[in-house]
Amino acid sequence: MSLFTLFRDDFEGNSLDTYKWKLPEPEGSFLGRTQLRLDEQPTVSNDSVSNGSVILRLDTHNPSASTPGDSFFGSEIRTAKFGQSSGLAFEARIAWTGPIQRGIVAGFFSYTIRDGNGDGRINKTDPHDEITFELLGNEIDNALQNPNQKQQVLTNVYNDDPLEEPGDKELVPIDGDLRNFNTFRVEWLSDRVRWLINGVEVRTEFDTVPDEDMDIRLNIWAAADNFPHAFDASFKPTSNPAENQTFSYEVDYVKIERLNVNTDDFIFWRNQQTGENAVWLMNGSNLLEGVGIDTHLPDSNWKIEATGDFNNDDKTDLVWRDETTGENAIWYMDGAHLQQGVLINTSLPDSNWDIEATGDFNNDGKTDLVWRNYATGQNAIWYMDGANLQQGVFIDAPLSDIDWKIEGTEDFNNDGKTDLVWRDYATGQNAIWYMDGANLQQGVFIDTPLSDVNWRIEGTGDFNNNGQFDLVWRNYITGQNAIWYMNGANLEQGVFIDTTVSDTNWQIVG
């Protein structure tokens, strides 16, 4: 069991990634004494994201106020929703970099609210779930005024509690200065919630544990008098834009992780029409969770051809090919997060050659590429060192019948060597080539053909954890998906994956 990164943003570039983050909708966008920004970046200018961080801003002048001077102008950004499932962690590195001002709240939290009475509006009696870290200007100022007092952070948690209720608050001390960067982490499990600051657990809650899917939010706002921990009556908004004061806090990164994951049970997807990419976390034939990969590639000439671990970090990477230019590339991944994209150092402009699979064929501990030429029937292996081609060799057995396609690799006879899976899209026959590097040792038919050639073999893996490698299928007419539980070349059982994807622009890629 391990961690799987569902989301990460290091705030590179000069603008907020609107694929990862959303701004508040009008309903529920007034918080305390603050109108949250609705239709712009978290700050007024595009400088909100720069130097690898995002700065969230609170202004004392609200240009959108219906009554000038009656409210502040704050910021909030939100992710998509994530469930608790096997456990969820969300983490951010945060510093209060603006002036210290009593009456301000800087939040990092998970949140959802339900329409309790069905009126389509958010009301103070509506039930909601929430887990929070809140940096309070009052608490920072108190500690700065008293050198013997540690700075404190407010933690809170709600489970189906009305919005108007105070929740289960607890102030926790921090060994450090909130004006410097500190790492805040929440671990949300089925039986508890844990809060950690700089890797040290500061609170654990067993009695109040949320159970609804929640998004992750960052915000900054001015508290009202119903939040006495944070309110300060002397902090007032202004009606005069010339008198505006700006307060802010800075976020270096945000990441969200799935806890307790079996990292073998993944299915990767690409939508060639929209450029979206995604991954399914599986438990056998049951979909646990589907999450979008955090980077689109709308250029449809680029196709994901295979998956494998190319930098030996025990994380699955994506192999790409552009058949118009012959360029090939690897996305080094951390779960659903793109860490780095690199071009493979050798292009292959002949578009008859397709990358079909990956595997370690020379037993050097490095992932190699399998190619097939659909004009000549030749097959080849590129022995790789990460994104660098070390040597290219032909597999010693060409297969001129180009109805046969290589669809995957695994060690199907448990001899420690990577084998090839084939499917004939004319006859529906399926086969395995037992290999020794680039040499064919034996070819055998899988004992069950599948004459409906709308079904394609799209991936492999041990989905029932029995030490035998299985086949993943997709039907590009019906949108159904399935797994064949295998024993070598013998089908033990075929089961449908419990989720159909009717949009056949979505292709399984590994």
Image (spheres, grey):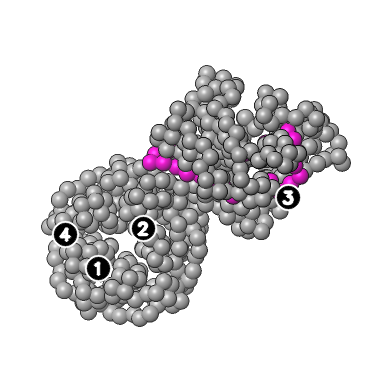
Q: Residue at x 55, y 48 (%)?
A: 198
Choose mark 4 or mark 2, whichever is in front: 4
**At label 3, which amino acid type do we have?**
Ser
* Quarter holding residue 171: top right
Choose mark 2 or mark 1, whichever is in front: 1
Q: To which residue does mark 2 refer?
A: 509
**Foreground: 185 or 376?**
185
Q: To which residue does mark 3 refer?
A: 45
Does the magenta-highlighted stretch encompass residue 265?
Answer: no
Q: In the rendered structure, which disc, 3 or 4, sits on the residue that comes first in sequence?
A: 3
Q: In the rendered structure, which disc, 3 or 2, sits on the residue that comes first in sequence?
A: 3
For the residues marked 3 and 2, what is the alpha-carbon distance in whole angstroms? 39 Å
For the residues marked 3 and 4, what is the alpha-carbon distance in whole angstroms? 60 Å
Q: In the rendered structure, which disc, 2 or 1, sits on the residue that comes first in sequence?
A: 1
In magenta, the rendered stretch is 84-107
What kind of element bears circle 2? loop
Q: Is residue 152 left or right of residue 241?
A: left
Q: Residue at x 35, y 71 (%)?
A: 366
* Circle 2 Cα neighbour tier, 10 Å, few/some/many (<14 / 14–19 / ≥20): many
Q: To which residue does mark 4 refer?
A: 488
* Quarter holding residue 73: top right
For the residues marked 1 and 4, what is the alpha-carbon distance in whole angstroms? 13 Å
What kind of element bears circle 1? loop
